[in-house]
Image (spheres, grey):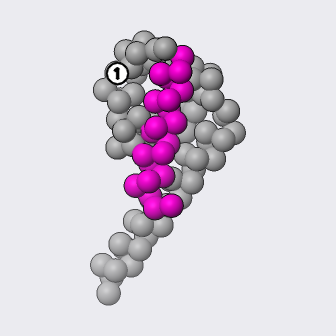
């Protein structure tokens, strides 16, 4: 799976959890102490929540914390690989 698909899949799982709980973005944002636009960016896969918020997010969404963190870390590792490859190409 490529990075873009990983990000979208991650966001989709957050959205599905929120919708399954019958919560609006605004309600979820309030529970998490963030702006609703941030929840929207997480759900669309355009940005990722910080690892420090993982526990609060999983509790608010009813997600498995370990699986959530593994997915999030997997995306972060892929992003770092891409950055590293780009840096290597610029050095040439």
- What residue range appears in magenta? 1-21
Classify the position of the C terminus by image quarter.
Answer: bottom left
Mark 1, other Cα within 10 Å: few <14 / some 14–19 / many ≥20:
some
Residue 2 appears at what percent x and percent y?
Answer: 46, 61
Left or right of residue 62, residue 43 in this image? left
Would you say residue 53 sits in the magenta stretch?
Answer: no
Most extreme residue toward the bottom, as rendered? 92
- Asked whether residue 48 is in view, the answer is yes
Q: Give me the residue at 35% from left, 72% from top.
A: 86
Relative vertical location of residue 17 with respect to residue 42 in this rendering, above or below: above
x, y (%) of residue 40? 35, 30
21 and 48: which is toward the camera: 21
At horizontal 62% and vertical 23% (from top left) the residue drawn is 62
Q: Which residue is mark 1?
A: 36
Looking at the rendered structure, the secondary structure element under dot 1 is helix
Residue at 46% from the left image edge and 30% from the top image edge = 15
Q: Main secondary structure of the magenta part?
A: helix
């Amino acid at each position: 799976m490529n990075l873009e698909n990983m990000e979208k899949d991650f966001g989709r799982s957050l959205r599905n959890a929120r919708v399954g709980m019958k919560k609006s973005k605004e309600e979820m944002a309030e529970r998490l102490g963030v702006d609703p636009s941030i929840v929207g960016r997480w759900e669309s896969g355009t940005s990722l929540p910080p690892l420090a918020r993982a526990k609060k997010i999983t509790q608010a969404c009813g997600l498995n914390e370990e699986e959530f963190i593994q997915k999030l870390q997997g995306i972060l590792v892929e992003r770092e690989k891409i950055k590293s490859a780009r840096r290597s190409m610029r050095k040439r």
